[in-house]
């Protein structure tokens, strides 16, 4: 096949249409560049971003000179195959050489590998395909924002791999969520991996539901992907990774096309550094092992201390300004400002949602009135849990202000054990959609209520973990320059202050759970392997009855301690 070059730049995708025929589908770079270089599009490379003239808050952004821009498309591949070779339908094969002996390649691989089915219609983006032998491939995910299958070189270039000739994207390693789809892509023959995440709102049922019932949430969702790109490409992200030792997978590529006029038409994609099981990384359904719970708290403590008001980080004016402009002014998805109708719904929702755990909850004395008691304080709690969303409160909480993850559920922690003999736990933190400025204690409350198994929290376990976090935070506040010594750190942020803020954040999360989140409650037993896989991305209160009981019982205790 011969591929013509349009202005020297062509986007090429190779498609097997039949066992004896190879077609190469090409589109001019000018068309691709026009699609990518719209007013609302930019692209991110590792620690690098092509920024708009304004950020998502409308503030002026500094000029930027990219080394990889939307107009630069991959060079074409040229592949030749022998008519006598049987190549599995759906495999994307490419080479930087003019010819590829596909038959020899398959013999060396020794097995039938199936990958991206580039022959699938660009409009058929809703179902995975199957190679006929049970190896389903998530070809609907591995596409660009316009629905075109991604070529091998897109991944090879991002991973700096010279010899890639194909890739696989098994459905077994895909993630299909309410608001995004993603999958692991593995290059052949080297086996290098990357994680590709694609968000097309108009293809997501949950996004369409939000458009009808709560369009303001869809607008926030769109901005959240801009926040991810801004943070992962920021100097602040690089600094906290290198200086605090926080493992954050790099963003290899990001393409953002938010549509402010019609948010349902927004599109986003991210190519991320992968932390795969083959390298020892894993996720827990809920965190129960003490070492793993502490490792997650240490990671949060490092982030909170590193960005604490007055820390050494803020001496870098450029990095500080970039962070301020790129992330949420007030972090956390659950906050009242993002969910303005919830406070008036708590009592009514409690009457219906509590029935999902009637057998376990009805024996408690709060069965009849927990909802109304929580609703009575919901507005005040919501404001104080997220003071940087309110101009009147922001100044009085400024000394506690720090950068928070905003969604520290267990699915956003990847874990592995280091080499013997120490086997030190290593932890990677992902998904910074709701990251921004807030109170460290409220970030910890979110973690405790969504990530940790009830078995680790009962019988004083919660207190043990909270004390561990506080001690870690105090240590790093001094190390990262927020305070000159341990005494100053304690005086400026006492344990009683921490606990008061933690309890406030805890109550605010309970408001969110009762008024909104419990509508998707799906109880799963610890020994239900299929159920655990299905609910891996859910918070503890939406999948574990023991956790739901613990959460409501603690809510009652905190309310009583405050006279409510």
Image (cartoon, helix red, strand yellow):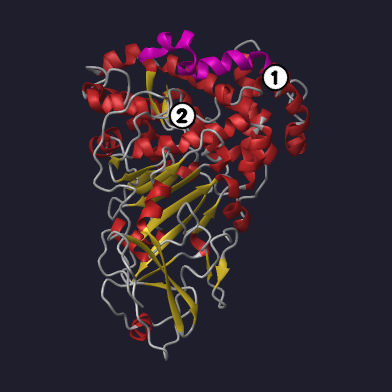
Mark 2 closeness class: few <14, some 14–19, many ≥20 residues within 10 Å:
many
The spot of residue 384 in percent (x, y) is 52, 15
Magenta stretch encompasses residue 69: no
The spot of residue 133 in percent (x, y) is 55, 78
Q: Mark 1 or mark 2: which comes first in sequence?
A: 1
Q: Quadrant of the C terminus?
A: top right
Q: Nearer the viewer, residue 458 or 343?
A: 343
**Image quadrant of residue 552?**
top right
Residue shown at 51% from the left, 70% from the top: 119
Specify the segment rendered in magenta: 375-399
The spot of residue 252 in percent (x, y) is 33, 50
The image shows residue 413, relative to residue 60, as above or below, that is below
Magenta stretch, main secondary structure class: helix
Residue on which the image places disc 2: 444
Instruction: Name the secondary structure under disc 2.
Output: helix
Instruction: Name the secondary structure under disc 1.
Output: helix
Residue on which the image places disc 1: 344
Mark 1 against mark 2, which lies toward the viewer? 1
The spot of residue 161 in percent (x, y) is 27, 63
């Amino acid at each position: 096949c011969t591929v013509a070059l349009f202005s020297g730049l062509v986007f090429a995708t190779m498609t097997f249409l039949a066992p004896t025929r190879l077609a190469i589908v090409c589109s001019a770079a000018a068309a691709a560049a026009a699609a990518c270089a719209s007013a609302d599009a930019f692209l991110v490379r590792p620690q690098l971003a092509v920024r708009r003239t304004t950020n998502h808050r409308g503030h002026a952004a500094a000029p930027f000179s990219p080394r990889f821009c939307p107009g630069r498309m991959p060079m074409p591949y040229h592949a030749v195959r022998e008519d006598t070779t049987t190549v599995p339908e759906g495999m994307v094969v490419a080479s930087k050489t003019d010819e590829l002996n596909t038959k020899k390649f398959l013999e060396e691989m020794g097995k039938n590998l199936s990958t991206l089915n580039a022959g699938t219609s660009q409009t058929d983006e809703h179902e995975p395909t199957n190679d006929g032998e049970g190896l389903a491939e998530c070809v609907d995910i591995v596409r660009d924002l316009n629905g075109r299958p991604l070529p091998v070189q897109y991944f090879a270039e991002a991973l700096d791999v010279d010899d890639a000739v194909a890739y696989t994207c098994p459905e077994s390693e895909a993630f299909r969520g309410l608001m995004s789809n993603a999958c692991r892509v593995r290059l052949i023959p080297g086996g290098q991996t990357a994680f590709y995440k694609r968000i097309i709102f108009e293809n997501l049922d949950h996004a369409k539901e939000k458009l009808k019932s709560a369009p303001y949430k869809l607008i926030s969702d769109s901005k959240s992907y801009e926040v991810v790109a801004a943070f992962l490409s920021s100097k602040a992200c690089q600094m906290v990774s290198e200086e605090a030792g926080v493992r954050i997978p790099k963003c290899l590529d990001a393409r953002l096309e938010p549509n402010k006029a019609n948010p349902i038409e927004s599109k986003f994609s991210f190519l991320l550094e992968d932390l795969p099981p083959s390298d020892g990384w894993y996720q827990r359904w809920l965190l129960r092992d003490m070492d793993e719970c502490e490792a997650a708290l240490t990671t949060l403590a490092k982030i909170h201390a590193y960005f604490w008001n007055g820390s050494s980080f803020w001496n870098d004016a450029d990095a500080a300004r970039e962070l301020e402009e790129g992330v949420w002014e007030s972090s956390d998805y659950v906050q009242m400002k993002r969910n303005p109708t919830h406070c008036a719904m708590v009592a009514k929702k409690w009457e219906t949602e509590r029935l999902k755990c009637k057998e376990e909850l009805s024996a408690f004395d709060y069965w009849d009135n927990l909802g109304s008691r929580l609703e009575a304080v919901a507005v005040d709690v919501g404001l104080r849990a997220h003071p940087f969303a309110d101009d009147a409160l922001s100044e009085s909480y400024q000394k506690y202000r720090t950068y928070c993850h905003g969604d520290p559920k267990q699915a956003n922690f990847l874990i592995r054990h280091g080499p013997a003999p120490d086997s030190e736990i290593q932890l990677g933190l992902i998904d910074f959609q709701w990251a921004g400025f807030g109170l460290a204690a409220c970030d910890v409350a979110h973690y405790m209520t969504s990530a940790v198994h009830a078995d680790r929290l009962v019988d004083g376990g919660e207190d043990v973990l909270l004390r561990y976090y506080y001690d870690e935070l105090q240590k790093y506040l001094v190390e990262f320059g927020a305070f000159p010594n341990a005494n100053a750190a304690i005086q400026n942020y006492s344990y009683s202050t921490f606990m008061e803020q933690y309890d406030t954040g805890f109550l605010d999360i309970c408001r969110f759970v009762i008024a909104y989140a419990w509508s998707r409650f799906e109880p799963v037993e610890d020994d239900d392997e299929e159920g655990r896989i299905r609910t891996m991305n859910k918070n503890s209160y939406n999948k574990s009855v023991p956790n739901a009981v613990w959460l409501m019982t603690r809510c009652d205790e905190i309310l009583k301690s405050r006279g409510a």
